[in-house]
Every structure is written in structure tokens, then in C-alpha cells.
Amino acid sequence: MEIYMKYDYLIVGAGLFGAVFAREMTDLGRKCLVIDKRDHIAGNIYTEEIDGIHVHRYGAHIFHTSDKKIWEYVNQFTEFNQYINSPVAVYGDELYNLPFNMNTFSRMWGIRTPAQAKEIIERQIREAGIAEPANLEEQAISLVGTDVYEKLIKGYTQKQWGRKCTELPAFIIKRLPLRFTYDNNYFNDRYQGIPIDGYTRMVERMLEGIEVRLDTDYFRVRHEIEADTTVYTGPIDEYFDYSLGHLQYRSLRFETEKMECENYQGNAVVNYTAADVPYTRIIEHKHFTFGKQPVTVITREYSSEWKPGDEPYYPVNDSRNTELYRKYQELAGQEQGLIFGGRLGQYQYFDMDKVIASALSCVQSQNK
């Protein structure tokens, strides 16, 4: 069996965690090899160009952070535009601004002042009389009242989770932010934007000068590559051949379509909150970069039940899965020269800035 040259680090996954880790270790003089089973780099933040439009193949990704160091770090590899995430929600024939703010409340109730909005919400919460929420529905109503729940939370959440809100545990929703200002900026973070030339180009720059092999399945080549340490960013249960059972996820399905019009919906992100609309949202990609192309590309996003073989997106961090992940962590702790990183390796949903921070922390711990 052929043995390739020896590496300090074999990094499994060319997504954001793997790319940051490889960049930092290479700059420190380590020999790194990055492999990915997909035919492209950048993981789920991969963007492909269609008629000059950067299309987010795996769902919308808006970079946002309040961490100045992370913002400065990522700006080494790309220039960000000034995109502000301001989604809208469609419920039947009605359209509302998100997050829940005074524009939302004014449209819903025909009121104008914060005091009026607070009075309506507080009254609805009182009338519901829920002291100890027993499920997600009761938890949501106890936080935002019945109108916001029925129109903007109920159907959307049921589509996301594939089950009724009354069948979901209350702890899924810890808080629902209500803003009593006319501010449609979804995020509170100080820094926000989209790479002007796309996320794929950003990751390409991170990986410059580093050996990368695509269409390469780790489990087929693991015995052919000699490395002191393996950094694995795939599912932790897959690494151990599901020996303790499968961790659960929610998955997504995307339908992408080129439209022969300049502007389909007037916004990058439009959520469909009614249960009778099968998709959860429509993304119009050109609006992320203020595109002026004569055509447009949209993606309808569907939430789906995950089964083995599907792409895992959102970890289901309930008590059963949390305990199972802990057991896999114990197995991982018995291995030498093995690091698990990223959303799948650590079985935790991460925003992009948190992925970068986690990778940088991992590099630091390797160099103590």
C-alpha cells in the first residue's frame, strides 16, 4: 500500500473550521493536508456563480459578529459589503418585518407607539394564563402573546421541526426578542456583511499554498495518509461508525431556479410562516450583494426529517442526543492525535464567527 508523505495535520473537511485551522498551522510552519469528500471547498458556505450572481448553495449565510478580533481576522481574506439582514415574513396575504419590532406590530394591529404594542402583548399573555409552559406553544405564547405566535411562529416552527408545537419541548425557545423600535436589522452585532466576491473565494484565500484534495473520502484513504494529528470536522458518530447509535439532525432540501426577471421578491430573505406553504423561506441571492443583473436566482428552502445518508444540518440538542454525544466524546478522549471540530464534529450549531473562534482556540491549544 502506498504511503504518501507524512503530514503534521490531516484536516478532514475544507469548510470554515478546517480552512482556518489549516491556514494558521501552515503559517506556523506545520505541514497540512486538507481533504474533502465534496467536489468543492468552503463546506456549507460554498457559493457558486450563476450569471454573475453568487448563489449560496446550502442556504443563506450572513456573516455577523460583535468580536472585533474575529472581524479583523476574516477581513484578511475578503472585503465585505454593507449588507444588513432584514428578512420579511409572509403569512397568507399579510407581510411583516422581522425581527419582531414596531414595524411588525404596527402592521399587525394598526398601532403606532411602543406603549400600545406592549399593552396588547401583555394583555394577550395575561389572558392566556400560562404559569408553567408545558410545551413550545405555551412557552411562545407566554413570551409574545397569541397573535405573534399564531402568525409568525407556529407554522414556521412546525415546518422546521416536522411536528406540532404542542409536541415540542418548551426549552427549545428560551427567549423571543421583542423590539419596541422601528429597526429591521435582524442581528444586534456590530459587524455584518457578505463577501463581495463570495464565500468560496474567501476560503480559497485561506487555503492558498496548502495541499487540498477534493472528492476524497476520509474513510477510503485514512490508512494511506500518514499524519501526526487528524482534525475531523465530519459527524463525530460517523467517525466511530455509529457504534453507539446515530445522533439526530434536521436536514434541508433546496430547490434553486433561475428566473427571467430582474427582481423576483425585492428582498434577499422572505420567510413563509403559514403551515400550508411547504417551504420555510425563499432566498433571492442577488440581493445579498445588491446585484443589478437582468436575471435572478431564487432558492426555495424546505426543512426535512434527517435520516442516515442525508446531509446533516441542525443538531437536535435534546437530552437524548446530548447524552449520546457525551458518550462519543468519551470515546474521542481515548484516541491519540485526534481533534474534533466544527458543527458536526462538536455536535453544536455555530454561527460563522463562532466557528472561526473555535478553530483559532484549537490552534492555540495545540501550540501551548
Image (tube, rainbow, N blue to C red):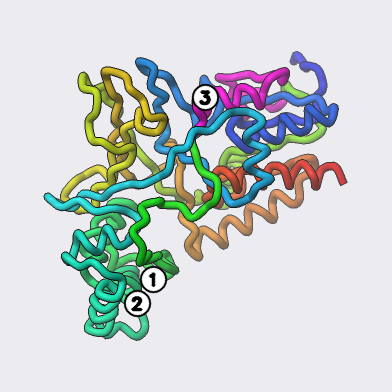
Q: Earlier in the sequence, mark 1 or mark 3?
A: 3
Contact, mark 1 vs mark 3 (Cβ under 8 Å) = no
Instruction: Answer whether residue 344 is visible to the viewer in this image.
Output: no
Marker disc for residue 170: 1
The answer to whether residue 340 is left or right of residue 103 is right
Name the quadrant containing residue 151.
bottom left
Task: Give the residue displayed 41% in from the left and 38% down from the top.
Answer: 60
| Three-letter residue code for mark 3 | Arg
Q: Is residue 113 magenta?
A: no
Q: Amino acid at mark 1?
A: Ala
Other residues around mark 2 within 10 Å, as few (<14) / some (14–19) / many (≥20)? some
Spot the residue most to the right.
368
Does any portion of residue 230 appear in the rendered image?
Answer: yes
Q: State which tag comes first along the sequence, 1 or 2.
A: 2
Question: In the image, what residue type sits under mark 2?
Answer: Ala
Q: Quadrant of the N terminus?
A: top right
Q: Which residue is at the far front?
A: 113
Closer to the camera in the image, 240 or 292: 292
Q: Circle 3 is placed at which residue position? A: 38
Q: Residues within 10 Å of mark 1 (few under 14, many from 20)?
A: some
Residue pointed to by mark 2: 134
Query: From mark 1 to mark 2, how far is it between C-alphas?
Result: 6 Å
At which x and y percent is residue 93?
Answer: 12, 50
Q: Are marks 1 and 2 in contact (CB under 8 Å)?
A: yes
| Residue 178 placement, left or right of 231 | left
User: What is the spatial separation of the Cα atoms under label 1 and label 3, in whole angstroms?
Assistant: 37 Å
Look at the image and give the residue range highlighted in magenta. 194-223
Residue in the picture at 23% in, 71% down: 146
* Residue 59, x across and y down, in percent: 40, 36
Name the side, left or right, on which 56 lies relative to 33.
left
**3D distance between C-alphas at marks 2 and 3:** 42 Å
Task: Please state which of residues 284 and 56 is positioned toward the viewer in this rendering.
Answer: 284
